[in-house]
Each structure stands twice: as C-alpha cells, then as structure tokens.
Image: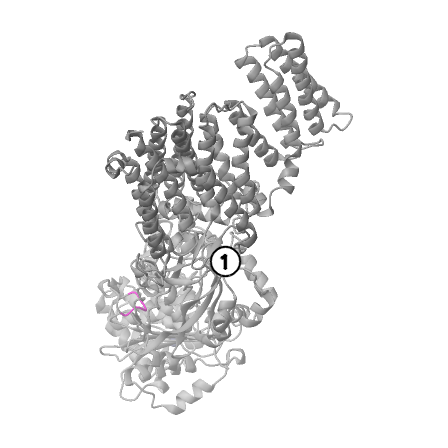
C-alpha cells in the first residue's frame, strides 16, 4: 500500500469540475435567457406561418343584385432560405414565365426599398393572382421546388361589365401602404380607387394565420398545437351600394360613342342611383395579372377612360344654372314671382336672347324659354338692389350673399362627408378674385354679367348639378350624395340659404320646360317632369350638351344631370338621355325603344365607341 | 465472504439515488427526443427508442446488482485479466466490425451490438488503479511511469484504429488521475498551454500581417510563449533583472525588425521564431552562469513550443481528418457555414436557446420533435432537456452531475486502499470528461466530438459501461466497513 500523499490535490480536481460546470451554467443562462435570437430561429425553423386571406366583402346594388364577388386565385410564395437546387429554367417553364421576369422579380423581392418586409426566413410573394388553370402545372410539380408554396387567394369577379368607376379596382399595396398600416405585407392587395378604396377596411376582413409544423426536411408535419394558435380569417363585410345596376347599364349604353357623364340621385336620401362616365372600361380587365398591362393602356389612352367625369370634370353649367339663379334672386329680393323684364330677342344688350317670345317676359316664361336677358336683369337687380354704396360696398355685400347662397347649393366646395373616391370642388369666383382682376372698385354687375347665365368663371361637376336638382326636388335641402346604402348620411341635412317658399315657382318653370320648352319632345307621357337644358360654349370644339332635371314633379324620386361633351344643343342629346334614364328608373323599363336605339347607337366620337 | 447485509448497509445510497435519478430522467428524455409526431409509441413499446432503452435500463440494473453481489477483491485480482480481455476484444473489433458511419467500433452479435471501446474505459480505470496501487509505485520512476502510460495509450491507439477519435480522446482524462497521484502539475499546465498555442496558431494562421510576410498565428503564439517566460521568471522565481533584460531585448529586436521592414520585406513568422529561439539560448546561458537549476526545463519547453507551433498547421492539415478539421474550425469561429458542418451546433443552440427559463414542457419541444437537431437521442440528448425543460431543467441536470462528481471525490478520499481511491478518481475523471465534452459541444463551446452523455444518451453500451463503472465503485466503497 502506498502512502496517501498529494491529498490536497483533490481540491484542485474538485475545482476544475466545479469551474467547468459553472461555465456551462453561465453559458446556458446566456443562451436561454439573455439571447433572444435563438427563440426566433426556432420559430422560423419549425413554424410555417401561412397567411389565410379572408374573402373580400361582396358588393350588391340597391336591389340586392350581386355585382362584385370573388373567385379563387393562387399566389406563389417563397421562403428564400429554403430554396435549394432550383432549376430556374424548368421552374420558369412550369409557370410559363420568362427567365428575365424571374430575375427581375427576384431582384424586386430582395430590394428592401421596394419591399421593406423582406426576409429570407419569411414567405415572400413571388407571383400573385394566378387562376386555377395557370397554376395547375405548378400545383403538380410544387414538390420539386422546395421553398415555394402555393397560397390561396381570391380575385374580384364582376357580374356586369358596368360601373367600373364606382367599384374601383384592387391592386398591390405600395410601400407607403405597408408603412402606414401594419395590416399589409408585401404582395398584399387593397382597394386602389372607387368604393374598393373608400370601404377598404369594411371589405377586407381580417387575415388569418395557420401555423404548421415543419420538419428539418421541409415537410409539413401537422398543425402547431393542434391549431390552437391558428387565427381563423374573418371574411370582409358585404357592401350594398346605392347604385341601381339596371339604371347604370342603361346610362352606359346611352353614352356609348359619346364623351360625357350622367349622375342620378335619389333626392330624399342623397343616394347615387347611377354614376356613369364615358369612355369607361370593363372592371374585369383590371383584375389579376393582366391588370398592370391593361392599366397602362388605360392611362395612355388619350380619351382618358380612367377619368371619372361625373365627379372630376368641371363645366360651366350654362343655362342649367338658370333655375338656381332664379332661386337666389328670389331669396335675395332682386325679383319676385311677378317680376317681368323686357327682352329684345337677338337685339338684347348686353346679352342676346336666342329664343322668340313675348316681352316683357315673366319668370316662368324666362325659365321655360331660357331667356338670357331676363336672368341678366334679375342678376343685376339682385346685386345692385341697394345701389353700389361707398366703394361698391353695398354691391359687394350682395355679391357675397349671392355667392354664399350658391355655396349652400353645394357649389364651389367638396362634399366633405362624402364616400366618393375622388371629386373636385368646381368654382365660384370670389370677391378677391375680381378685386385682383379688376381692382377694388373696378367691377360691377355688368362686368361679371356672364355669371348670370352660368357662363364665365362658375364651374360645376355633373355631381354638383345633379345635387342641385335634388335640392330643388326637396324644396331646399340636400343629403350629401353617397354610394353606401347603409350609412348614416341621411342624418345630416344640408339646408340651403334659399327659403322653401321660393321653390314652387322655379319648379313650375322647369315643369314648363318639359311641357312647352326645350324638353317637350322628351316628355314621358303621363308623367310630370321638371328639367332644364343647357348648351355651353367652350373653347375646344362644339358646344357641350347639358341637361338637369328631376321627376316626377310631385314626390320626385330621381334627380339627374347629364353632360355630353362637344355634342351641340342640350335639347338634342342630354335631354333625351336624361329622359330615358328617368323612364327606366320610374317605370322600371323603357318603352320608347326607337328613342333609346337612336341615342345609344349614335356615335358622336368614334374613339370612345364600346368595342 | 458474502455479507449481503453489510453491502446493503454500507452501500452509498446517495450515489445510488443520483444514479437512478439520472437514468430515469434520461429514459424520459429519450422518449421525448425520439417521440415522433406520426407514431406516438408508449415508453414501453419495444419498437421505439424509449422502449428499447427500457430494456437496456433493466439489464443495466441487473448487471449492477450482480456486481454488488461479487466479492470486492474480485476487481483487484482480475484487473489485468479484464484489461487483457478488453484489449483482445478491441483488436478483434478492428478486424471483424462492420463499418458504421465511418467507424469500425461495433461488435454485432445477433440482435445485440456492443462497443468494446466503452468497456475499455472500465478496464483501463481498473488497470491503472491496480498498477498505481502497487507497493512502492513512484510516478517519477520510469519503470513505473512508462507502463502506466502504455496502459492508457494501448486502448487509445486501438480505438483510434477503429476510427473513433472521440472515444479515444476520453482516455486523456486519466491524466487527472495521474495528477492526483503525484504527476507534476506543470505537465497539466504545459498541456493547457499547448492547447492554447494550437488554437491561436490555427485561428490566426489565415490572418496575414499587413504589408509584410507571415501571419498573426505564429507571431501571437510566440508572444504567448515569451509572456509565459516572463511571468515564470519574474513572478515565480523573482529574477527581476533577468526578466527585464529579456523584455528589453525582445522589444528591441521586434522594433528593429519593424523598422527594417520599411526597406526590406521581413517575414515576421521567422522573426518571431528566431527571437523566441534566442530566448531559449538566453536562459541556457543564464543557467550555465548562475546555476539556478530552474531554467533548463523552460528553455527546453520553449524549443518544443516553437517546433509544436511551427508544425501545428501541418498537424492540423495532415493528422486530423477533414470533418474534424472543419469541426475544430467552426469551434474557433473560423468557418460560419450554418447549413453545412456548423448546422448541428447551430441547431442545437437554437433548440436550447428556444427553451427559455422554464422550457416548453415535456414532449412540447418543436426543434427536437421535428428533427432539426441531429442525433438528438444520443450525442445531442442535452438539447431535448434544454428545449423542453429550459434553463431550470438544464441546470438541474448539471447540478446532479456535479453532485455525483463531488460525492465520488469524497468517496475516493475516504478509501483506505489506494486501489479503491485511484479507481474512484478514474470513475470521476471519465464521468467528468464525458459531461464536459458532450454538454460543451451541445452548447457550442467544445468541438463536436461524438461521445455520449452518461446515463442520458440512448444506447446500451454507454449505459452498461457507466453502470459497471459506478457499481464497481459502489461495491469497492461498500467494503470499507467489512472485516478484512
Ligand atoms: Zn328672351
């Protein structure tokens, strides 16, 4: 037996053991508690988060006709980190794309400027909105391309090829969308215009997530925690529009071959019954992969089919302004129901009359016959009823009152609470404008006389003109024109500056237009209709043909404005179109087939004929 | 001779309890690690890993029981025979073992495969205990020391021939036993220094010195050697004058070479080696003049270190196999290929890291269930603990091992017989080495050397050999109260 020397070395050995174990405990602490990257690494390893897109809300018309629905489509997503041994050429052939497109797409995906959410660990959208037949080949061969996945999506489908500007379209979200709203990821789609834009949050629903377990070979091994952590997508809410699709259809057919627009409103509710603009396009061409190509064609089309003329084009209202002028002059005391003014026909100064009628002319006759001299004299009588005053101050006070009244009719400003995608404010010239132009005292009624007959600086959109008709139909108020049938717009009446007592005589005058005046050929038998034609000079080609009106005279159900650009007399084109629209809406059908056929087949501008 | 009562009375119940705890925890973790989402087998289903391990555990208990029934002197008497038998098995294995994953270490006998290398650990522990407990054994005497080294190197060499480098490296742990029994501590220190030099040379061998020839690897390694010299002379021997002359001379020579580099291209590798070789000469001269009798060995070791470092690159490139080169490179952060060879370690870090403080819960680990971690029920079993039982579970397991190790050390020191004590140190060293390397590799701080985690890793050979190892110790320890 040996002596047990070196006994103290047990402590050295125990020390070595303890130090190593302690180092490992510290290492565990840093791995498991301090560092977070390993937890993220584990999730991106094992959990495949598949976005489940909710079906977008359906869109119905006011009579619950389905207008916009969804059909299945497919996205190809990829997780860059998982892509191995990709045979690019074969892959491109399977998808029927070019190699250039493939490289371009890959470059865009990796570009963090274009795609801020890029990561090699998370699914990135490679191609979107493929139809079942386009993806069939890929679906069979997807196993050959590890890292690529097929995601189910939906694409918009349209029952009718109409109302494209009402619906708007859906497009890929931009970088700013992604930064603004955390809901969106690269490759997502959102409404870009129309109600698809305005009601994006209403229609889009809530995305769901399916969390799948994926093993080290990329195979799906079932659901994470048996699906407890999944989020079920919530379908978008449906949207019922105020549009009457039959009326919309008739409107689009009537404008065939013409540049112009129609806006029809239900006066009591402000609901837009139809909003037609021509040239337009079939909404289904801006869906799916052909979207960008077709969109570019539309953008470059000189006839501007993307422009919604109903809300974005501004016109001098011309003679259609006369009923409004009459109302304001009555209200401001420039005239009363019995006021008559002389008319010298063609020899009238400073504004000629283009019609033949007796003189002096009454207000009713002046509206019926569209007598320019009457409205000039009424306008002057209103603005100068108190003389000019010190430095034109009395005149300017009256001008301001005239302007304010016009403003209360919806002119010169946007409908702030409207759900319309885009609309413009038109124009009412301000005092400042004339002061700058003519000097502080350099202008008086005579200077701005063209305003009396709706020419000159006053500009309005067809939407504003239709809204004015709704005001007259309502005898003094309007509800902001809107497209969502189930909103709360009705709660807010906009009352005009003109007392309701002023309206009957103007309504009577407008009724006379259909009975005896420029609209008499287009009166619907047995129906009391009110309206006013307008023929507006413009610097580019023929006069614009305008018509505004409402019907029936008692308890009106439709107020309408029609503009046909460069078409000539208001009575020739706009009036019959408005009349047919009113017939369709009030009677539910069109009996005057000869008139409908004549108008809808008249091609005034071959460039905008429907193909 | 059979005193059953005395065995049950005097057996170390704590060690037995720790053993059972670790084995049962291991069994549950093997069930967790091999648990397949598609086939939920029971823990007793013999078609699955956990069920098979259950059989191994039961047989291990039987073996342990049999060992406890044997006379404690059996192991001392038969140590050489057991060792010889094992060596024979190792030799046979080289020739008849089929190649499995690049190694020839498994003896297949019908349905059972065993790894003789595992048994060699036990028999080597026994044989060195027997040899070192000889009457009048002296560590410094070459006639005692050389056979001792031979006993360790023989199985080491045979296992290397089986291409099981990992298992072979286990035998280096017996240096701890030798240290406890009187081997110079400097040898352990030197060994550590050489490992540091090796790592430095490899890690910086690809980092060139700007605007000059050579790489940082050799220069830094030589710097470490010079600093070691200075520390030894100044702080250990308090030869301040000699130390300052050394430091001044080295600095001067270095500056001259740096300045020279402006006109002629200097190869700093050679400069570093030349300066270091000069210091060896310097210490030899001092030794000749002053006769301190303290610098002969350091001067010799300096020359050895120069040779070692200079050939390290070649050792690295020629002795180690390519996959081991890569593993070591990854450990030294010289390669960062997460999908290639670094995959295992990275995935195992992810699995453990994702466990957090409390872990994901038993059978709830995603990384291990989905097979991201390779060999997760054998070499990487600690991942399952880390992922499913978190920091708490991992630390608990480490503490159990630490407790067991400390207990064995105190058991060793209470033995009256040197054979028992030395054997106990052999057991502790083997256990420690396995835990250190295995857990270290899973935590990404040790190279990936495929050795099992004692009591945890799936497999009969490993469980059996550690059971035998531990139960022999228990049996020897139980004898301390027996009449002689
Ligand atoms: Zn007239």
Picture quarter with ligand 1? bottom left
Q: Is residue A439 left or right of residue A395?
A: right
Residue beneath disc 1: A82
Residue A13 lies, with reference to residue B333, above or below; the image says: above
**Horizontal and vertical percent position of residue A584:** 32, 84
For this view, does B294 lie left or right of residue A566?
right
Task: Judge from the rendering whether residue A189 lies leftward or rightward of residue B4; answer left or right.
Answer: right
Nearer-the-camera pick, B173 or A46: B173
In the displayed structure, does residue A328 sit left or right of residue A26?
left
In which quarter of the view is residue B12 placed?
Answer: top left
Badge 1: residue crowd in 10 Å (few <14, some 14–19, many ≥20): some
Residue at 59% across, 36% down: B203
The image shows a total of numbered marks equal to 1
A268 to B75, vertically: above or below: below
- Say which residue appears at 42% left-offset and 49% top-offset: B461
Main SS of residues in magenta: loop
């Amino acid at each position: 037996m040996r002596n047990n020397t070196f006994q103290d070395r047990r402590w050295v050995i125990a020390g070595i053991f303890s130090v190593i174990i302690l180092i490992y405990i510290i290492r565990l602490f840093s791995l498991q508690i301090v560092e977070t990257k390993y937890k993220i690494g584990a999730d991106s390893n094992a959990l495949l988060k598949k976005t489940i897109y909710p079906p977008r809300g359906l869109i119905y018309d006011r009579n619950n006709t389905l207008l916009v629905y969804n059909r299945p489509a497919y996205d190809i997503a990829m997780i860059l980190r998982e892509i191995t041994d990709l045979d690019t050429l074969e892959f491109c052939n399977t998808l029927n794309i070019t190699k250039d497109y493939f490289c371009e797409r890959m470059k865009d995906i990796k570009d963090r400027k274009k795609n801020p959410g890029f990561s090699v660990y998370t699914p990135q959208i490679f191609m979107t909105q493929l139809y079942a037949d386009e993806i069939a080949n890929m679906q069979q061969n997807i196993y050959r391309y590890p890292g690529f996945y097929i995601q189910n999506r939906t694409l918009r489908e349209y029952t009718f090829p109409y109302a494209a500007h009402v619906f708007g379209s859906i497009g890929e979200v931009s970088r700013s969308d992604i930064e603004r709203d955390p809901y969106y990821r690269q490759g997502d789609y959102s409404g870009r215009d129309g109600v698809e834009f305005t009601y994006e949050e209403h229609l889009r629903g809530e995305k769901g997530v399916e969390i799948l377990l994926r093993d080290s070979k990329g195979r799906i091994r079932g659901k994470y925690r048996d699906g407890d952590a999944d989020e079920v997508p919530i379908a978008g809410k449906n949207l019922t529009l105020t549009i009457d699709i039959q009326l919309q259809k008739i409107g689009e057919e009537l404008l065939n071959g013409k540049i112009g627009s129609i806006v029809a409103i239900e006066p009591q509710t402000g609901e837009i019954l139809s909003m037609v603009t021509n040239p337009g396009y079939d909404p289904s061409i801006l869906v799916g992969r052909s979207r960008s190509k077709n969109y570019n064609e539309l953008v470059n089309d000189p006839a501007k089919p993307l422009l919604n003329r109903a809300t974005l084009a501004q016109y001098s209202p011309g003679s259609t302004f006369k009923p409004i002028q009459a109302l304001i002059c009555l209200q401001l005391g420039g005239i009363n129901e019995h006021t008559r003014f002389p008319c010298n026909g063609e020899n009238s100064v400073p504004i000629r009359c283009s019609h033949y009628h007796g003189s002096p002319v009454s207000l009713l006759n002046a509206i019926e016959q569209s007598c320019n001299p009457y409205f000039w004299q009424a306008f002057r009588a209103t603005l100068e009823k108190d003389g000019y005053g010190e430095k034109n101050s009395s005149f300017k006070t009256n001008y301001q009152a005239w302007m304010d009244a016009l403003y209360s009719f919806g002119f010169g400003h946007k409908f702030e609470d409207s759900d319309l995608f885009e609309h413009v404010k038109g124009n009412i010239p301000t005092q400042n404008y004339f002061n700058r132009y003519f000097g502080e005292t350099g202008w008086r009624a005579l200077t701005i006389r063209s305003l009396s007959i709706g020419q000159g600086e006053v500009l309005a959109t067809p939407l504003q003109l239709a809204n004015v008709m709704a005001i007259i139909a309502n005898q003094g108020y309007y509800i902001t024109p809107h497209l969502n049938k189930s909103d709360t717009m009705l709660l807010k009446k906009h009352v005009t500056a003109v007392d309701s007592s002023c309206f009957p005589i103007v309504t009577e005058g407008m009724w006379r237009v259909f009975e005896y005046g420029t609209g008499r050929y287009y009166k619907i038998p047995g129906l009391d209709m009110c309206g006013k034609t307008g023929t507006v000079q413009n610097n580019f080609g023929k006069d614009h043909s305008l018509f505004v009106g409402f019907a029936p005279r008692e308890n009106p159900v439709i107020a309408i404005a029609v503009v046909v650009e460069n078409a000539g007399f208001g009575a020739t084109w706009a009036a019959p179109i408005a009349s047919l629209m009113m017939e369709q809406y009030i009677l539910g059908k069109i009996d005057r087939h000869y008139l409908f056929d004549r108008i809808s087949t008249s091609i005034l501008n071959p460039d905008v004929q429907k193909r | 001779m059979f005193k059953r009562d005395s065995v049950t009375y005097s057996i170390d119940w704590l060690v037995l309890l720790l053993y059972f705890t670790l084995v049962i925890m291991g069994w549950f973790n093997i069930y967790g690690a091999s648990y397949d989402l598609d086939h939920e087998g029971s823990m007793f289903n013999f078609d699955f890993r956990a069920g098979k391990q259950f059989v191994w555990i039961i047989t291990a208990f039987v073996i342990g029981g049999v060992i406890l029934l044997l006379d404690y002197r059996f192991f001392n008497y038969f140590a050489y025979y057991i060792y010889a038998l094992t060596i024979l098995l190792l030799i046979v294995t080289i020739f008849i073992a089929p190649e499995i994953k690049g190694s020839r270490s498994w003896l297949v006998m019908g349905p059972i495969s065993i790894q003789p290398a595992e048994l060699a650990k036990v028999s080597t522990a026994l044989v060195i205990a027997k040899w070192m407990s000889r009457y009048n054994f002296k560590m410094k005497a070459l006639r005692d020391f050389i056979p001792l080294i031979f006993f360790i190197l023989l199985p080491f060499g045979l296992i290397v021939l089986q291409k099981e480098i990992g298992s072979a490296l286990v035998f280096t742990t017996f240096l701890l036993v030798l240290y406890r029994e009187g081997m110079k501590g400097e040898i352990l220190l030197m060994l550590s220094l050489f490992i540091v030099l090796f790592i430095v040379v490899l890690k910086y061998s690809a980092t060139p010195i700007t605007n000059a020839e050579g790489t940082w690897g050799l220069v830094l390694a030589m710097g470490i050697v010079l600093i070691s010299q200075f520390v030894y002379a100044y702080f250990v021997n308090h030869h301040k004058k000699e130390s300052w002359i050394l430091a001044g001379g080295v600095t001067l020579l270095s500056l001259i070479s740096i300045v020279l580099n402006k006109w002629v291209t200097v190869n700093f590798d050679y400069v570093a080696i030349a300066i270091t070789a000069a210091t060896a000469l310097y210490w030899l001269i001092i030794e000749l003049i002053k006769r301190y009798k303290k610098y002969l060995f350091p001067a010799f070791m300096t020359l050895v270190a120069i040779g070692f470092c200079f050939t390290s690159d070649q050792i690295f490139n020629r002795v180690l196999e390519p996959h081991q080169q890569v593993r070591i490179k990854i450990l030294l952060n010289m390669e960062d290929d997460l999908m290639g060879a670094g995959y295992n370690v990275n995935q195992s870090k992810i699995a453990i890291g994702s466990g957090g403080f409390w872990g994901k819960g038993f059978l709830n680990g995603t990384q291990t269930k989905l097979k991201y971690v390779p060999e997760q029920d054998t070499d990487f079993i600690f991942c399952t603990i880390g992922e499913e039982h978190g920091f708490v579970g991992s630390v608990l397991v480490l503490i159990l091992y630490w407790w067991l190790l400390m207990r064995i050390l105190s058991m060793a020191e209470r033995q009256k017989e040197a054979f028992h004590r030395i054997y106990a140190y052999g057991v502790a060293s083997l256990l420690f080495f396995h835990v250190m390397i295995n857990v270290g590799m899973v935590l990404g701080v040790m190279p990936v050397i495929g050795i099992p985690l004692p009591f945890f890793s799936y497999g009969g050979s490993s469980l059996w050999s550690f059971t035998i190892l531990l139960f022999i110790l228990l049996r020897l320890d139980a004898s301390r109260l027996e009449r002689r």
